[in-house]
Amino acid sequence: ILLFLFVFFLLRKTREKGQETSEELPDDLKEMVEIIKENGGRITQLELRKKLNYSESKISLMLADLERRGLIEKFKRGKGNIIILKNL
């Protein structure tokens, strides 16, 4: 019974983490997610920076926030990063 309860709460917590929607995001992060969606769910960090017109550090912080929330994945490619939206 204890094992069942542990697994139940663990699964529930995992689901809640992944269910973060764009409505719960600040406006700047919503804008970033929309731009990634408009590009087919994949964009380079440099392209994203050009479209959003934010500083390099602001873009990096925003991407780190989205990655922590489980909404994107970053992949190193050459000198830059490719950003992929997890939940299209």
Image (cartoon, rainbow, N blue to C red):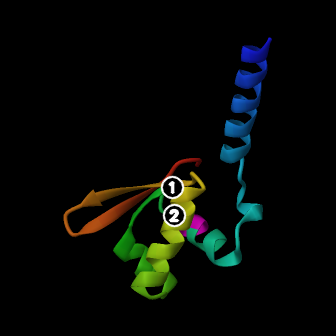
| Residue 11, x across and y down, in percent | 70, 30
The residue that mark 1 highlights is 72
| Residue 31, x across and y down, in percent | 62, 73
CA neighbours of label 1 inside 10 A, class few (<14), some (14 to 19), many (20+): many
Residue visible at 65% across and 69% down in the picture: 30
Compared across the picture, whether 33 is left or right of 25 comes to left
Outermost residue to the top: 1
Label 1 sits on what residue type? Ile
* Camera-side mark, 2 or 1: 1
- Earlier residue among tags 2 and 1: 2
Compared across the picture, whether 17 is left or right of 1 comes to left
Residue 65 forms part of the magenta stretch: no
Which SS class for mark 2?
helix
Q: What's the magenta region?
A: 33-38
| Residue 18, x across and y down, in percent | 66, 45
Which SS class for mark 1?
strand
Residue visible at 76% across and 30% down in the picture: 9
Q: Is residue 42 above or below residue 59?
A: above
Residue visible at 49% across and 87% down in the picture: 54
The image quadrant where one finds the N terminus is top right
Residue visible at 51% across and 55% down in the picture: 72
Mark seen at residue 53:
none
Query: Which residue occupies the foreground of this view, 31 or 3?
Result: 3
Residue 37 appears in the rendering: no
Mark seen at residue 36:
2
Main secondary structure type of the part rendered in magenta: helix
Label 2 sits on what residue type? Ile
Does the residue at mark 2 contact the one at mark 1 (Cβ under 8 Å)?
A: yes
| Residue 61, x across and y down, in percent | 49, 74
